[in-house]
Image (tube, rainbow, N blue to C red):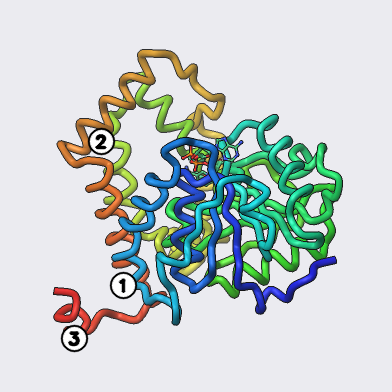
Amino acid sequence: MTVTNPESVRRVACVGAGVIGGGWVAHFLARGYDVTAWDPAPDAEQRLRRLVEAAWPALTQLGLAEGASQERLTVAATLEEAVADAQFVQESAPEKLELKRELLAKLDAAAPAGVVIASSTSGYPMTDMQTEAATPGRLVVGHPFNPPYLIPLVEVVGGERTDADAVAWASRFYEIAGKSVITMKSEVPGFIANRLQEALWREALHMVANGEATVQEIDDSITEGPGLRWAFMGPMLTFALAGGEGGMAHMLDHFGPSLKSPWTRLEAPELDKKLYDAVVAGCDQEANGRTIADLVAERDQGVIDVLRATGRLPRQTTADTEGTA
Ligand SMILES: NC(=O)C1=CN([C@@H]2O[C@H](COP(=O)(O)OP(=O)(O)OC[C@H]3O[C@@H](n4cnc5c(N)ncnc54)[C@H](O)[C@@H]3O)[C@@H](O)[C@H]2O)C=CC1
Ligand SMILES: C[N+](C)(C)CC(=O)CC(=O)[O-]
């Protein structure tokens, strides 16, 4: 059903250019694509260009593709213009089901026939979003992680009316575009990683709501603890090592019964004003005067350092360091 080989794609359209759409734009530009973006907000173009500019030092460290340039970004005046000659479309509009339904239908009507359209949704199944589209077969979920220009993972999954070819095409395209892809066989709300993250997030909010842990303690418990292992070894294999030479089997014999212990409260807590204020104030306190821009730069450098330290990027040589000084 698709017109272009994933290998031959040169022109990508990004629709919705906030945190994630802007991150996708930066990623595709750095990989040498021509990118056309569209976003209805009056200040969208300035925000987008600022985001790309801020991401560029990190992307330069990672290594730009030949010919990659911020000048290959065009901001279109209309949605139709943005996708008119696109070979792939990434939608990153707000997480509102009705909006996604209408927008995906409009993109489907405007994009050239056969071009795959992916949604960045954090959790809506494509089956629920493709209801209004005339040709739903080309609509897939391509769920990224923030920032899409640094975190490799994309979760790809289709809906009930998506063609299997479109899912395969999108997975291959993302791989060529430098992403690490998990192609899911079935639709799970929240996909894999957000389902896991949401469980952690819910427990964290319960602890803040009940005064059992501060925002700072929750963050330290991960960055000084399991987070160090999770950058290179997932929770399953990490726990297999908790079983010593007996591996996961011993771990399950030993700790399996504790699954039934009353440690978790997986019902979501009420996000009332008190909890809301406590989480926001805790984050401000933890930031300790660092602006969002400071934290973005810190996070980007941190992710690059972790990718390097875990062998997923070449280690930096003295010459590299001197070059960037
Ligand atoms: N923020 C995050 O960490 C992540 C978000 N996502 C998903 O990415 C998508 C976008 O989220 P964010 O970038 O965080 O939101 P955002 O609020 O930063 O950006 C959304 C952008 O969409 C624009 N917009 C509003 N109405 C639109 C329309 N009808 N058509 C096109 N654009 C429109 C807004 O002007 C805004 O610039 C959502 O589906 C979200 O679930 C996925 C992974 C991570
Ligand atoms: C907060 N979030 C649910 C939108 C996060 C994601 O979807 C993925 C991420 O970047 O962690």
> Residues at badges 3 and 2 in contact (C-beta under 8 Å)?
no
Judge from the rendering whether residue 6 lies leftward or rightward of residue 45; answer left or right. Answer: right
Q: What residue would you read off at disc 2?
A: 216
> Which structural element holds mark 2?
helix
Q: Is residue 60 visible?
A: yes
Place of residue 252 in the rendered image (x, y in percent of width and height, measured from the top left): 56, 53
Q: Amino acid at mark 3?
A: Ala
Q: Quadrant of the C terminus?
A: bottom left
Q: CA distance from mark 2 to mark 1?
A: 30 Å
Q: Amino acid at mark 1?
A: Gln
Mark 2 / mark 1, whichever is N-terminal: 1
> Which structural element holds mark 3?
helix
Write down the quadrant of residue 173 in the picture: bottom right
For disc 1, the neighbor class at 10 Å (few under 14, some 14 to 19, many from 20) is few
Q: What residue would you read off at disc 1?
A: 61
Q: CA distance from mark 3 to mark 1?
A: 13 Å
Residue 266, placed above or below residue 278: below
Q: Which mark is residue 319?
A: 3
> Residues at badges 2 and 1 in contact (C-beta under 8 Å)?
no
**Count of numbered tags:** 3
Mark 3 / mark 1, whichever is N-terminal: 1
For disc 3, the neighbor class at 10 Å (few under 14, some 14 to 19, many from 20) is few
